[in-house]
Amino acid sequence: MDILMLAGSLGIFLFGMKMMSEALQKVAGDTMRSILSAMTSNPLKRVLTGVLVTAVIQSSSATTVMVVSFVNAGLLTLTQSIGVIMGANIGTTVTAWIISLLGFQFDIATFAIPFIAIGFPMLMMKSRKKKSIGELIIGFSLLFLGLEYLKSSVPDLGNNPQIVEFLAGYADAGFFSVLIFVFIGTVLTIVLQSSSATMALTLVMCNNGWIPFEVAAAMVLGENIGTTITANLAAAVANVQAKRAARAHFLFNVIGVAWMLILYKPFLSFIAWIVVAFGGVSPYESAVSTTIGLSLFHTVFNIVNTCLLIGFTPQLVKIVTRMVKQKTTEEEDTFRLKYIQRGMLSTAEMSLSQAQMEIVHYVKHATKQFGEVRDLFKEITTEKFDELYQKIEKGEETSDRIELGIATYLNKVGEIDLSEESSRRLQAMYRAITEVESVCDSNYNLARIMFRKKKMGVWFDQELRDKVNEMFDILDRCYVCMNENMDKGYDAIDIGNAYECERDLNEYRTILKEEHIHNLEEQKYKYATGIIYMDLIAESEQLGDFIVNVSETVLELKHGL
């Protein structure tokens, strides 16, 4: 029963933290995206960004997973990501301070139930933002309720002397005991998937006198290593650069723990001196003071580690580049969702950003397909023509699977409570993938017309070929505009470039249509040739409409339908 009480208390704590973290990300999701996307080359700003985002969302794991997905999308370079990850390690120490200053200094659980009374009615409100704030309040309350239950469910050492004997056997083994508790901290964090939860357990054990200050500090070091597992799991199915970012996180923390173990005793003495200097009792002497000492140790260690290693970022990049090598023989044509991984990210907002990256990739697939269509129009040898046509046909099947994959993912995201803005983004993305699929269908239709042309033995003279190629040149410009607008995405101001290309396409189509009627009267070419020719022109004009529709979905991200 004691074990179940302990596990249940930990469950309430973890659920409260998850709920609070997700609610914070809903409220501040767009701010986080803009901050992370606007990274500069300044190392200090990268670190401060990591600190700020992690302190706000209360989860270094969420920050690092988000950073890995941004690197996977090419929004952050490997060098930039390392700076943000370093900052995330500092930002996550805020949780320990909240617990040690509020959770142990006075009974905040007394206020937890009234807080739930305030937060629960907000869940009933229509405004999604107020719902998110309600979730935030309830999550905060559950976190401290869980902490309170955690403290009360820890067995009383007076009634359980065997626990003291068990811990004493490992805590008094000198430096070996430090290594053991580093390992315990690592394993606990990997199992719980939260360094904050392990930190809470460590603080509770210290507060109850289970373990001394130096052993607890060793567990904190282990937690720093264990927390890197989340980003590495997220990067397991990502691209090479994302894998390198995750490895850099692991390497950064392992190097930090290594030098800290060398200076372990002096560093702990320094932390104890700071606590005493500010009027506190030495963490070695008071269990209550140990919680403050641990929080200080956690923060100072991560700040010092960041200051020491931030100058060696280029060297870290070189090491992880050697650890994770680029596969030169990777097959790019095989179907694979590039940015959407096995599961959703920690919040719907982050998952939508991942889906947006996938749609941008989908647009690039459609653009590549049109390049193949142009090559097909130029091809005169039967063997190469058939090979290229089959490739386009295969690309059309791939585009259908990409659309289905993204739509399935968006359906899962839509099952979660979304903010008003995120709901608008979701609807815009549904329309975007439909329009991109129409672009791919239109590409394939052009290829089918060319296949029919070859089968019928229709031959275009140079004048007709030049006019079709000029139509394709305008379409190329339309594709460039579509890619530019989708790359800008949420930050796009207008899509005037797309409308301009569409106007040029429509005007040229009208000119060619009038010329075609005149040419038929003059019998410049056969009627069958004219049918194929105008089919190509009409399909090209329709393709231009679909391309503009894709650009219009960018405006819907901000302004709705």
Image (cartoon, grey):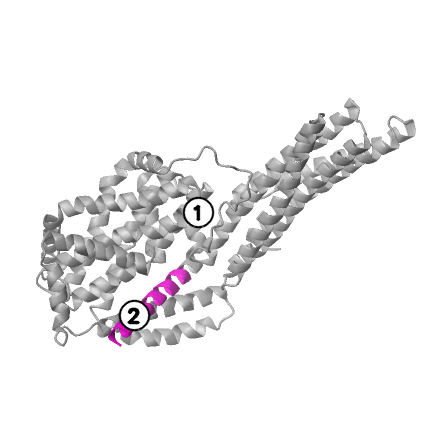
To which residue does mark 2 refer?
7
Which quadrant of the figure contains the N terminus?
Answer: bottom left
Residue 468 screen position, x and y as percent: 74, 30
The residue drawn where x is 30% and y is 46% is 250
The quarter holding residue 178 reads bottom left
Residue 122 screen position, x and y as percent: 44, 71
Question: Foreground residue, 111 or 483?
Answer: 483
Instruction: Please report the bounds of the magenta region as a residue range.
Output: 1-24
Instruction: Indicate yes or no whether the magenta region holds residue 16.
Output: yes
Instruction: Indicate yes or no whether the magenta region holds residue 349.
Output: no
To which residue does mark 1 refer?
237
The residue drawn where x is 26% and y is 60% is 198
User: Label 2's element?
Assistant: helix
Q: Is residue 492 visible?
A: no
Q: Amino acid at mark 1?
A: Val
User: Label 1's element?
Assistant: helix
Question: Foreground residue, 53 or 542?
Answer: 542
